[in-house]
Amino acid sequence: MRRFIQAIRGFWSASHKVQIGIVILAFFILVALFHPLINSAIGHGSDPLAVSASEAWELPNAQHLLGTDRYGRDILAMTVTATVASLEVGTIAGLLSTIIGVVVAFVAGYKGGKLDSFLSGFTDIILVVPSFPLLITLSAYTTKVSLFFIALMLAIFSWPFAARTIRSQVLSLRNRPYVELAKVTKLNDFEIIFMELLPNLLPFIGVGFASAALGSIFALVGLEVIGLGPSGTLDLGLMLNWAQSWGALTLGCWPLFVAPVVVLTLLFLAVNLINIGLEEVYNPRLRKMAGA
């Protein structure tokens, strides 16, 4: 446990860019956790997402900071609720893909041999499968598409990216002196992986999870924009779909389009800041260029 705590502290203190990225992600996580209270405050005790809760197409004002849509629903409350749904898909898909990728990477990288060749070949096959067209086809011919279904399909096709990255790191660590010492002290493979290798790879696993989650969120947005997303679920992509189909920008209701774009941009910025910060720390050439 001490090794994991040290690894987490090292992850946080790696770079100011990493810290900024984590703070942005933490903000959206807090919004997701407390969204019922936030929506209650926005609606002043009533449901701000109820149809005809206010006048339609209101511009941003003191009561509705981002205005209302064609049904009189508060756009800020819609953005909060949509962010929660998008984060749910990203979290489920990110966790599933990261777990699969970590298991495959550690088994292939640590064991090596024929098992490594088989798993690496299988990973390369999944890697080149055009996942988004398949997801479009499945969504189009599935009667009821749920958030979990979308997350599961995204996880099935997104784990190879994490697996390839983590496997390369396992290959470089498995012959280190402390691993050889662990073998001499009669630790089994599971103990070596969990106690010696895993703490050193937490930053890469964290980045893999964040990247998979972000990719899943953007994939969901793509499905919603073309009208193939989960039915009855308000997410960021559905808001963009409504803004496009209703002609919101023409009507002057720019927050319906801008709000989800800003949220997606901030999520993308956060993950990329973490990636860049960790690259500057763990990549010697970038560390020299950054002056670290």
Image (tube, helix red, strand yellow):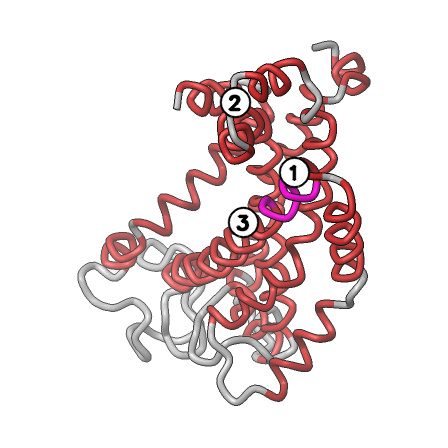
Would residue 60 be visible to someone looking at this image? no
Q: Which residue is mark 2?
A: 186
Q: Is residue 115 magenta?
A: no
Q: Which residue is mark 3?
A: 99
- Quarter of image, res 244: bottom right
Could you say whether the residue bearing mark 2 is in a helix, strand or loop?
Answer: loop
Could you say whether the residue bearing mark 1 is in a helix, strand or loop?
Answer: helix
Question: As shown in the figure, which amino acid type bears the numbered disc 2?
Answer: Lys
Would residue 200 be visible to someone looking at this image? yes
- Quarter of image, res 108: top right
Instruction: Using the image, determine if residue 240 lies above or below residue 86.
Output: below
In space, the residues marked 3 and 2 are separated at their CA atoms by: 27 Å
- Residue 132 position within the rendered picture, expressed as x and y whole percent measured from the top left: 71, 69
- Residue at x 51%, y 25% (from the top left corner): 187
Which one is in front, 108 or 148?
Answer: 108
Dot 1 or dot 3, earlier in sequence: 3
Dot 3 or dot 2, earlier in sequence: 3
Question: As shown in the figure, which amino acid type bears the numbered disc 3?
Answer: Ile
Q: Residues within 10 Å of mark 2 (few under 14, many from 20)?
A: few
Instruction: Using the image, determine if residue 39 lies above or below residue 28.
Output: below
Dot 2 or dot 1, earlier in sequence: 2
Q: Are marks 2 and 1 in contact (CB under 8 Å)?
A: no
Pick out the residue farthest to the top.
291
Which one is in front, 250 or 145?
Answer: 145
Which one is in front, 95 or 174?
Answer: 174
